[in-house]
């Protein structure tokens, strides 16, 4: 190893933080399942409007928006699951993993259909996650 490489390694080691502790990229503490729910409400609204329309162009736009919102639901759920909830929460609420798995799967299912019943299921699952979330905030 060259003298320059060793010097750079030493410099990096001296400037490295000793420990870092944060639950997310920016430890803001602002989490809320309402973000996922709002997007899921949009998914359902797109489905209802799709089913009420005879305009092919409108239906294409409604489908594109619905699919985008489904991805946003999954994103917001996974931020909660991976950044907010901790091992202690899972010990306290052993069904937490299944709730997130089912809600994420329902968001994926909603992309494949325009059946509002699927959106209702998604909303119900998000509500169940929300109940546990708020119970952890007490």
Image: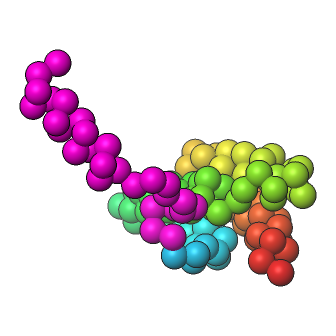
Q: Nearer the viewer, residue 3 or 110?
A: 3
Which contiguous range is marked in magenta?
1-27
Residue 77: horizontal and vertical position, in percent?
62, 59
Which residue is at a point 70% across and 59% down the rendered structure image? 85
Residue 127 appears at what percent x and percent y? 78, 69
Foreground residue among 132 and 21: 21
- Residue 12, quarter of picture: top left
Q: How is the image coloured?
A: rainbow
Label total for image: 0
Quadrant location, the C terminus: bottom right
User: Toward the viewer: 98 or 42?
Assistant: 98
* In the depicted structure, whether residue 109 falls above or below residue 31: above
Q: Residue at position x 66%, y 50% from top? A: 104
Q: Residue furthest bottom?
A: 138
Quarter-wise, where is residue 6 in the image?
Answer: top left
Residue 78 colored in magenta in the image: no
Residue 25 point in image, percent of width and height: 45, 61
Q: Quadrant of residue 84?
A: bottom right
Which quadrant of the rendered structure holds the N terminus?
top left
Residue 78 versus residue 54 in the image, above or below:
above
24 to the left or right of 124 = left
Residue 66 appears in view: no
Residue in view at x 56 percent, y 49 percent: 111
């Amino acid at each position: 190893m060259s003298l320059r490489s060793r010097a750079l390694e030493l410099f990096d080691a001296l400037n490295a933080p000793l420990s870092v502790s944060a639950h997310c990229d920016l430890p803001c503490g602002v989490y809320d399942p309402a973000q996922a729910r709002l997007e899921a409400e949009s998914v359902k609204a797109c489905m209802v409007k799709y089913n009420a329309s005879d305009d092919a162009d409108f239906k294409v736009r409604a489908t594109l928006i619905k699919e985008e919102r489904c991805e946003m639901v999954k994103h917001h759920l996974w931020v909660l699951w991976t950044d907010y909830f901790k091992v202690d929460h899972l010990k306290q609420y052993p069904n937490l993993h299944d709730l997130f798995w089912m809600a994420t799967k329902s968001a994926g299912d909603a992309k494949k259909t325009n059946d509002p019943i699927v959106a209702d299921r998604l909303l119900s699952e998000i509500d169940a996650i929300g109940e546990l979330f708020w119970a952890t905030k007490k």
